[in-house]
Amino acid sequence: NAGVTQTPKFRILKIGQSMTLQCTQDMNHNYMYWYRQDPGMGLKLIYYSVGAGITDKGEVPNGYNVSRSTTEDFPLRLELAAPSQTSVYFCASLRSSGNTIYFGEGSWLTVV
Amino acid sequence: GNSVTQMEGPVTLSEEAFLTINCTYTATGYPSLFWYVQYPGEGLQLLLKATKADDKGSNKGFEATYRKETTSFHLEKGSVQVSDSAVYFCALYKDNQGGKLIFGQGTELSVKP
């Protein structure tokens, strides 16, 4: 059971660099989410998607972009990395008629 | 809008003590409610859930009851162990609110031997 797969698990970026965090789920879930978790803090919703071709901003979307061209994939793009984006990023998915959320294992990102 | 409020941590207990972590929510109708646990350096794991009023979720000795009248979903365990040391997150999901999944701020639990 693959579930929700995130890559990479760890990454160090320099200020101003760009990168994409990949998220794939194999459960045919409609809803997908990206969260960030800062040290000692809770989860903040960055973006979410209720289906292919549909994305919406969460609480903290600035500095990020997403796309949802397929049901399976929901990549998160950082265009100009800033130290404030140092965080742990979690992808999650949910079937719209279900009530169990599946999380990826997290991606630890450091911007220096 | 929908929101989740948890009691602030850190909570420090001795082994075998009774645990309560408060969680209250704001939402119309009947959201699904969850408790997630995050062990140090790891991702989030579902601990338990409840999908309708008066449901009781339970797992690994933890319990939480969905109380519509008090809009609460407090997490309890009768006798905590050192291995229960983690951060606990309460979360809410409501299908007809655009699919948003809302988390509380998390409560850190530290259990001492």
Image (cartoon, coloured by chain):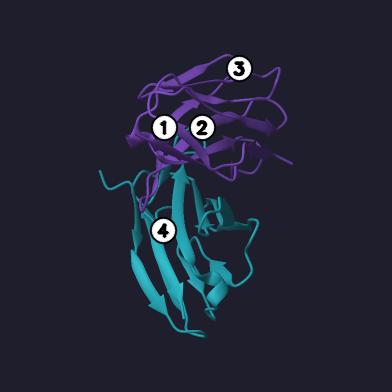
- Mark 4 or 1, closer to the camera: 1
Q: Are marks 3 and 2 on the same chain?
A: yes
Disc number for residue A73: 4
Within 10 Å of disc 1 (Cα), the crowding (few <14, some 14-19, many 20+) is some
Q: Are marks 1 and 2 in contact (CB under 8 Å)?
A: yes
Disc number for residue B53: 3
Residue A84 figure quarter: bottom right
Looking at the image, residue A50 lies above or below residue A108:
above
Disc 2 sits on a residue from what chain?
B
Which comes before the other along the chain, label 3 or label 2? 2
Of residue B92 and residue A57, the one placed in the foreground of this image is: B92
Q: Residue at x 67, y 32 (%)?
A: B25
Q: Which residue is mark 1?
A: B47
Disc 1 sits on a residue from what chain?
B
Q: Colour of chain B?
A: purple
Residue A29 drawn at (x, y percent): 43, 44
Q: Are marks 1 and 2 on the same chain?
A: yes
Q: Residue at x 44, y 73 (%)?
A: A110
Residue furthest out toward the left = A1
Looking at the image, residue A7 lies above or below residue A72:
below
Q: Are marks 3 and 2 in contact (CB under 8 Å)?
A: no
Q: Amino acid at mark 4?
A: Asp
